Image (cartoon, rainbow, N blue to C red):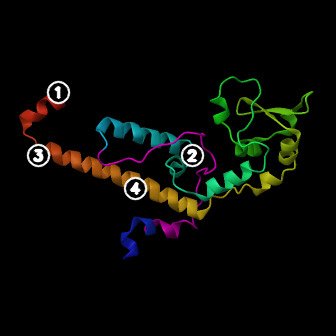
Amino acid sequence: MDASADPTYRWAPELEAQHCNLDFLARQKNVHLRHLEVSEPPLSSLELLATYLVVLGRGESLARYLGVPLLSDFVEEKFNKLFSTCSLPLAETDNAQDSNMLSWVDVIREFDYDQVEHTDDGTYRFPIQGLLVQISETDYAIIRSGILQKLLNPWSDPRDVQEELVTVELAIHTRQMFSWIHLNWIQRQPVNALTPILA
C-alpha cells in the first residue's frame, strides 16, 4: 500500500518533531462518548461534534473518551493500584458525582504540602480542584514521597499521539462523508420539495 496515500502514515513523520499539547491523563471519569457515524441525524451529528470540540478545547484526548486503548489508560490503572482504594475518597460530600470528578493522577499532579491538614482520626485532608480529599496515612506517605510525581511523564507517548491523530482524522472524514451524502440528497430533490425544509 502506498504510505503517502494513507492518512495514518502521513502523520507519522511529524510525531517525533512536534510536541503534543494534549493531556492524555486528564479525563472526566465515567464519561464516555460514541463515534460519529455517517447515518447520524443532522442535529445529533452537530451536537456530538460540539462535544468533541469541548474535549479538545480542554486539551484532553478525544481517543480516551471514545474508548480507544491507550498507554495512558495502562499508566493510570497502575497508579490507582498503588493506593488503598481505586476511587479517590472525598471528605464532607454527599454527592457521588463529586468522587467521579477527580483521579489519583489529579492528586499526584496537584498535591501541595502546605495545604494538608492532619485530622484527629489519623487521616489527611487537602483541597484538589475545589474538592476536599481525605486519604489514609499510607496513601499520604506515598504521595508526599514525591516519587510518583517524577514518574508522571510530561511528554505524551508517541503511540498515544498516533491514536489521537487517527481518531480525530476519522471524525473529520466521517463528517465530510455526512455532508457529501446530504448535499447530494438535496441536489436530487425538486425545488418545490425543498421549500418546507428551507423555509
1 or 2: tag closer to the N-terminus? 2
2 or 4: tag closer to the N-terminus? 2
Quadrant location of the C terminus in the rendered image: top left
| Residue at the (39%, 73%) spot, across then down | 4
Q: Residues within 10 Å of mark 4 (few under 14, many from 20)?
A: some
What amino acid does circle 1 point to? Ala
| Residue at the (7%, 39%) spot, across then down | 190
Q: Distance between the residues labelled 3 and 1?
A: 18 Å
Q: Which of 169 and 143 is in front in this view?
A: 143
Tag 1's secondary structure? Answer: loop
Q: Which of 41 and 137 is in front in this view?
A: 137
Residue receiving disc 1: 199
Q: How far apart are marks 4 and 1 (CA)?
A: 33 Å
Tell me, for residue 59, which label it has, or none. Answer: 2
x, y percentage for residue 95? 65, 25
x, y percentage for residue 61? 55, 49
Tag 4's secondary structure? Answer: helix
4 or 1: tag closer to the N-terminus? 4
Could you tell me if the residues under marks 3 and 2 are in contact, i.e. CB atoms within 8 Å?
no
Q: Answer left or right for 79 relative to 171.
A: right
What amino acid does circle 4 point to? Leu
Q: Distance between the residues labelled 3 and 2?
A: 41 Å
Residue receiving disc 3: 188
Quadrant location of the N terminus in the rendered image: bottom left
What amino acid does circle 2 point to? Gly
Q: What stretch is highlighted in magenta?
A: 10-39
Residue receiving disc 4: 170
